[in-house]
Image (cartoon, grey):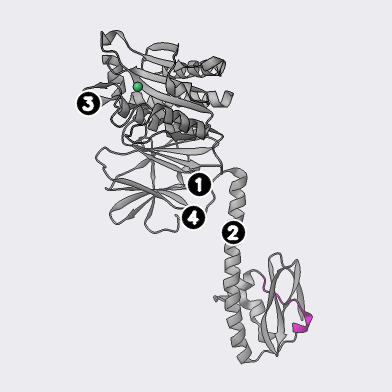
Amino acid sequence: MVKVQRNKFIALKYRTLNGNLSLWSITQNESSYAVKSADKIRYAETGMKRKSLYYFITFYKFSVTEKSQMDLRLSNKDRKKTSLYLASFALIILIILALAISFKNDSAHNKSGTVSAADVLINEKNVVKVAKDKDGNIYMEENKLFKKYTIKVSSAIKNINYKQDDNAVLISFDKDVPLKLNSEINDTNSKYIYMTNDNGKNNLKFKKSYKDNNFVYINSGKDSNEIIVLVSKVKKPFTHKAVLNPGHGGIDSGQSVGNLYEKDITLRIVKLMVSDLQYNGVDVVLTRDKDEGQALADIAAFVNKIQPDVFLSVHINGMDENPNNYQGIGVYYYDENGYQTNERIKLANMVLKHATMSDGWKNDGVVRDKLKVIRLSKAPAVLVETGFLTNDSDRARLQNDKVLGNLANNLSQALVEYVNEK
Ligand SMILES: [Zn+2]
């Protein structure tokens, strides 16, 4: 009559109430009883074969745990009621199952640091896997903290929007753009990128591992028309903090030659630095992210409030007389009453070394100078003059997106090296 079964999942307990079968409780149980021969509750043993809601219940070994229920006598009427209960059960079990699966995936990616298959995107309509190609438009690199996607888009694309939900970063393109993955991206990573086509738009999706600390920068790559997407691989990727100050702003343009203004170029360089620093675990705060004026004392007060590990002010030099005799990158520090002398000199040298690494920049040296913004900063601070706008060859560099990208990358590397050696 009674068969003992092992049940590693969920035992559904029943009891009789006035002759009716009803839900008693759901418990986790190692062993339980299933009624075998009582044909009036045949569903207990044949459910696996039936394509009904009940299927889901028996899949997890529907069981009756009390011997008193072995000879339940169910009328047809009772059976109808029972199937109602069973339907409720099925729903509950499906919910539990869904929770169990999502929990399992959560712990899996906490352990390995990789993305789980929540597969929200896979189940979406119109999903197209982005093609793999050696001349691709999407490049991916990763470290322990982030996956960094660089997407090259054609300059013809004007309207690029992005948004994020808990599961994905989504970038929408105005036109039909054929985007291909670089072949260097392996299959494991490529499956986290999808394209969907909705309402005449191409939507590029990047699956997230964690809902926070994912970033998108439009036109912030080494060339214009590059989009950088950072997807965090750990919950808290930032170990350090930097404040960056793009020199000048608002009515104060700084150096200018024709339509070229120092305030615009410094802002461009600093914005390019953000993704590089974040990718390497350094959180970034900008003193301004648009064209607005700031008093030097206010900038220093802002830095002191944030208390970063390092502060960098970016400027561009200029010389009116014999402008082509002056060129190169120089770094300025100040150590009032010997405050942080060694640290600041060390930082200045690191910044100079890295900043002059690419593109033939001349090394204009480290200079001790009483500049207000670095003098008032309590955090280790330097001011870098990234070339002379008045010099023909420096000006050509400062108008070259690729050079600015390299410069931003090199300055970031200096700060990363500095905070990690501190
Ligand atoms: Zn300046």
Ligand 1 under 8 Å from disc 3 Cβ: no
Badge nearest the viewer, 4 or 3: 3
Q: Is residue 84 above or below residue 108?
A: below
Tell whether position 326 is magenta: no
Q: Earlier in the sequence, mark 3 or mark 2?
A: 2
Q: CA distance from mark 1 to mark 4?
A: 18 Å
Q: Secondary structure at mark 1?
A: loop
At 34% from the left and 30% from the top, the residue drawn is: 268
Q: CA distance from mark 2 to mark 4?
A: 12 Å
Residue tagged by mark 4? 119
Q: In the image, what residue type sits under mark 4?
A: Asp
Q: Quadrant of the N terminus?
A: bottom right
Q: CA distance from mark 4 to mark 3?
A: 50 Å
Q: CA distance from mark 1 to mark 3?
A: 40 Å
In the displayed orientation, state which residue is furthest to the left: 258
Residue 274 appears in the figure: yes
Badge nearest the viewer, 3 or 2: 3
* Cβ atoms under marks 2 and 4 closer than 8 Å: no
Q: Which residues are magenta?
A: 61-70
Q: Earlier in the sequence, mark 1 or mark 3?
A: 1
Give x and y (percent) for residue 347.
51, 19
Label 4 CA crowd tier, 10 Å (few <14, some 14–19, many 20+): few
Front-most of 205 and 316?
316
Residue tagged by mark 2? 101
Q: Earlier in the sequence, mark 2 or mark 4?
A: 2
| Quarter of the rendered image showing ligand 1 | top left
**How would you classify the magenta stretch by its main secondary structure?**
loop
Residue tagged by mark 3? 259
Q: Secondary structure at mark 4?
A: loop
Residue tagged by mark 1? 212
Give x and y (percent) for residue 422.
59, 24
